Image (cartoon, rainbow, N blue to C red):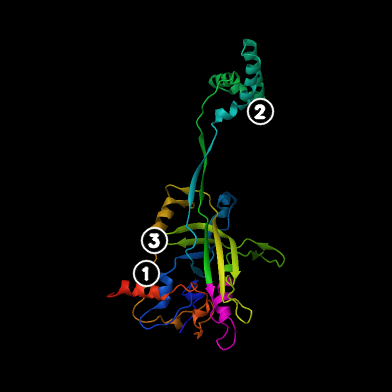
Amino acid sequence: MPTNNQGSQKEDTIEIGLPPVNQIDGIDELNLARNARPYVILSAMEPEPVKEMSEIYKIFKLKPAGGPKLKIYFDPTEPITESYQNILTDHFLAQIIRPSEKASQVMQMLGGTENAKKMAQQLAIGRIAWSLGENMMKMMPQGVREVISAAAQGLKYDFPKVWQDSAMNNQQTITTTLWCTNPHTSQHGDEFKKHIIEPLVQLFRFVLPRPGPNSKDKYQWPYFCKANAPGLFYIKEGIVTDMTITKAPHNEFSYVNRPSIVEVRLTITPIRSVMLYEGDSTLYTLKDWKWNMNQEKKVLPIRGGASNISSVSSPATAYSSSSTKPSSFKSGRVAISPDEKQLYQELTQGS
């Protein structure tokens, strides 16, 4: 008998994105569904209050905000990418002598004579003094003045670029699917609320701003988040910057005007821009990256009988069994196929 498992809850973790499954003797299809999909655990975070002005630099140090974690099973349709850059800038001498390069045009116009040389040097010194100030010009070492003089005569230096900053892009986008085999509220109870509305309410917690304190007409930042997908990506401090909800993406509407499938696309963006190579830090470090990459999802057993589906609950109440087969969905929408079952049986025989 097919059973929907949207928003199922285990302890303080709510599972979202599991497809409808059939209970078949000898096969635990709920675990089969869990094994077939990658997941990310989303935890709510909030800014840690600053107690003293001397700690103002901690203004964006996040702490756990409490509440249930979301274990979101997502469709592996988009690549998991991350990139790291070093940003270069001009050598400081290259920036100082830039006005001299304009003055060097005098040398070209007047044919490189001694008078042209003196005029170009005076123009270069004057332009640089105007930009830096007379006192800075007087303090400038003789060697630098010689570089300026040479540049004014049209001579070039190949100054090396220097490091300006580093950057990391670890923004991740995932898509999860919510299913409801019985969107109507009649004989099966309100499964639409359990499997569509309540999981969406949990996701909205990470994207909607919150009311301001003691205020009915003001609002403030939403919850920040920590996102951990074992072996795939780890966002130590982030925020959901986009949540796109697509109802009935392939026209899966019921006769009561409700969608039986809802796709949710989440973009999780780090609030930090750099990953450090070593050391313990409140910033994202290589140690955090290695910790995530060394993790792996636990493969759950699928043999030995069907799951105790009644023990799996939504964010609010236990699920009701459904008599409507998932064949009403378009081909390919339900992840568990006969071929997959056969493959798992062959791989686990004797286990």
Front position among marks 3 and 1: 1
Res. 117 in view:
yes
Query: Is residue 257 depicted above or below 124 in this figure?
Result: below
Residue at numbered disc 3: 295
Residue 195 falls inside the magenta stretch? yes
Q: Is residue 145 magenta?
A: no
Which element is circle 1 on?
A: loop
Q: In which quarter of the image is the C terminus?
A: bottom left
How many residues crowd mark 3 within 10 Å: few (<14), some (14–19), many (20+)? few
Q: Is residue 261 above or below residue 82?
A: below
Near-viewer residue (169 or 263): 263
Q: Which of 14 and 176 is in front in this view?
A: 176
**Residue type pointed to by label 3:** Gln
Q: Which numbered marker is on residue 299?
A: 1
User: If the image is split into quadrants, where does the N terminus sit?
Assistant: bottom left
Mark with earlier residue (3, 2) = 2
The magenta stretch spans which residues?
A: 178-201
Residue type at the position of mark 1: Val
Q: Where is residue 198 in the image (x, y as percent from the top left)?
A: 57, 75
Q: Position of residue 122 (x, y in %)?
A: 65, 17
Q: What element carries label 2?
A: helix
Mark carried by residue 131? 2
- Report whether residue 121 is seen: no
For disc 2, the neighbor class at 10 Å (few under 14, some 14 to 19, many from 20) is few
Q: What residue is drawn where x is 63% and y is 18%?
A: 108
Write the residue at 62% across / 60% down. 221
Name the amino acid, label 2: Ser
Asked if labels 1 and 3 touch by Cβ distance under 8 angstroms, the answer is: no
Give the alpha-carbon distance from disc 2 to disc 1, as whole Å: 66 Å
